[in-house]
Amino acid sequence: MTAITKICCIGAGYVGGPTMAMIAKKCPHIEVTVVDLNEQRIAAWNDVDVTNIPVYEPGLSDVVAEARGRNLFFSTDVESAIAAAQMIFISVNTPTKTYGSGKGQAADLKWIELCARQIARVANDNKIIVEKSTLPVRTASAIKDILTHTGNGSQFQILSNPEFLAEGTAVEDLDAPDRVLIGGDNTPEGRVAVQALVDVYANWIPRERILTTNVWSSELSKLTANAFLAQRVSSINSLTELCEKTEADINEVARAIGTDSRIGPKFLKASVGFGGSCFQKDILNLVYIARSYGLSEVADYWEQVIIMNDHQKRRFANQIIKNLYNTVNGKKITFLGWAFKKDTNDTRESAAIYVADHLLHEQAEIAVYDPKVIKNQIYADLNYLQTRKEEENRKGVEVIEDPYKACEGAHAIAILTEWDEFKSYDWQRIYDSMLKPAKIFDGRNLLDADKLKSIGFQVRSIGG
Ligand code: NAD
Ligand code: UDX
């Protein structure tokens, strides 16, 4: 195969947008077209004011500004982009199924299949199809099955190239990844396809960081990486409860074990619970796959990571209730942060949603401030749970754009996201404006508890 000069990516979301922007930036000789059915999203990617792109990531608007219109294009014309490209990335959403068999666990591959069928319909020459979405192991065989029946003689190679970027650090992760993983068939055609993708990444990534495996190892490695990372968070979180009973301090424990080079210091930050669109979905998917092969011990082992995370979110909400004299009815509780982590506007599976839902059930009045999440998203997140009517969510939750105003008259503040700006607030001013005793529940162990206590706050940290 000749070198790749035209790439199409189906799905202009948190992964498709940033990954393709980086490929376009680093490979000016490749024309990259990112397509999506969502017209509003494409319009936002094309907004003349590049700060209005739909994904907030530090540094991303600069990358888009450099390449957009040169060799990076965003379009809703899916078919033309498929037809023109030699290499097609599939980067559509693969959420947990909400219906039918596998409901609540299996990945919903509806959108993947639609992509495969659309490619089959439109393609009239040979193409390399790249799975960028996170997929259950052996999905490539389903894609292949659909594509081999096009009837026009086109040949397709399916590669797995999972994405490891984390939100909030997407640009640095894409610029200098720990590794890029490419899985392909061990046939002459498969090896040629793998090499074509290796050559794209080799424009900026050292060759030794580009790993190649068979397709199934690559697909399974993505689920495994997320399961391991989430398992570390659940492991440290499981010990926060024990710390609270025994006067051990989770930060000290994390530092003590993290200096062991076999354990390492990363992903040991105790929290109100992990969120994000990936960890829960991918572990549930792993659990589902293991069960479908009859591996119940394997499934139970990984399911415990989710059980512990749900417990941590509930425990945080219950601690607030208990500490506010066993009732939050009519009490104002201010949430600082709604995003699932700092430096992103993404709220999918954010712990804040579940903590808010629990407190609303107890008839609390919640005020929310988040530097990047818009009001409608917060209501949409709560409405999605279908716990109560939309009007009731609007009545129980007020979204306020000024953090000081959000805290005024509050009985308690809960820190749900570790935004840096929270650390530099005038906490004396906040204290003065709150009801007393003024309480802070720091779900991220972000703030300086001693300093806050010296102002007069009652502070509850996680595992402290
Ligand atoms: P997303 O929901 O932000 O974006 C997916 C986009 O695909 C949407 O805009 C949707 O409109 C579009 N789409 C769906 N079907 C389509 C079709 N048939 N034609 C055209 N467009 C279509 O999702 P995301 O967060 O970018 O995740 C995409 C995949 O990447 C998922 O499998 C996810 O597990 C994986 N992943 C996500 C992250 C992350 O940090 N978000 C990291 C690594 C991997
Ligand atoms: C994750 C993986 O890290 C990434 O490789 C994959 O491609 C997508 O899924 P992401 O969900 O964007 O990335 O963010 P991540 O930094 O992993 O954080 C996930 C959640 O875990 C967040 O809610 C975060 O606050 C929480 N977390 C993380 C902790 O509570 N403690 C930690 O020590 C680390």
Image (tube, helix red, strand yellow):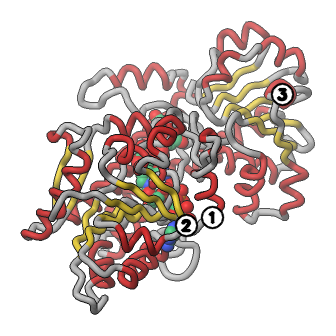
- Amino acid at circle 3: Cys
Labels 1 and 2 touching (C-beta < 8 A): yes
Density class for disc 2 (Cα within 10 Å; few <14, some 14-19, many ≥20) is many
Density class for disc 1 (Cα within 10 Å; few <14, some 14-19, many ≥20) is few
Separation of disc 2 and disc 3 at Cα?
Answer: 43 Å
- Amino acid at circle 1: Glu
Compare residues 235 and 198 and report the one nearer the observer. 198
Residue where numbered disc 3 is placed: 407
- Amino acid at circle 2: Thr
Nearer the observer, disc 1 or disc 3? 1
Q: Secondary structure at mark 1?
A: helix
- Look at 91% across and 27% down and name the residue there: 409
Farthest residue in the front direction?
A: 70
Q: Position of residue 189 (x, y in %)?
A: 12, 70
Q: Position of residue 463 (x, y in %)?
A: 56, 28
Residue where numbered disc 2 is placed: 76
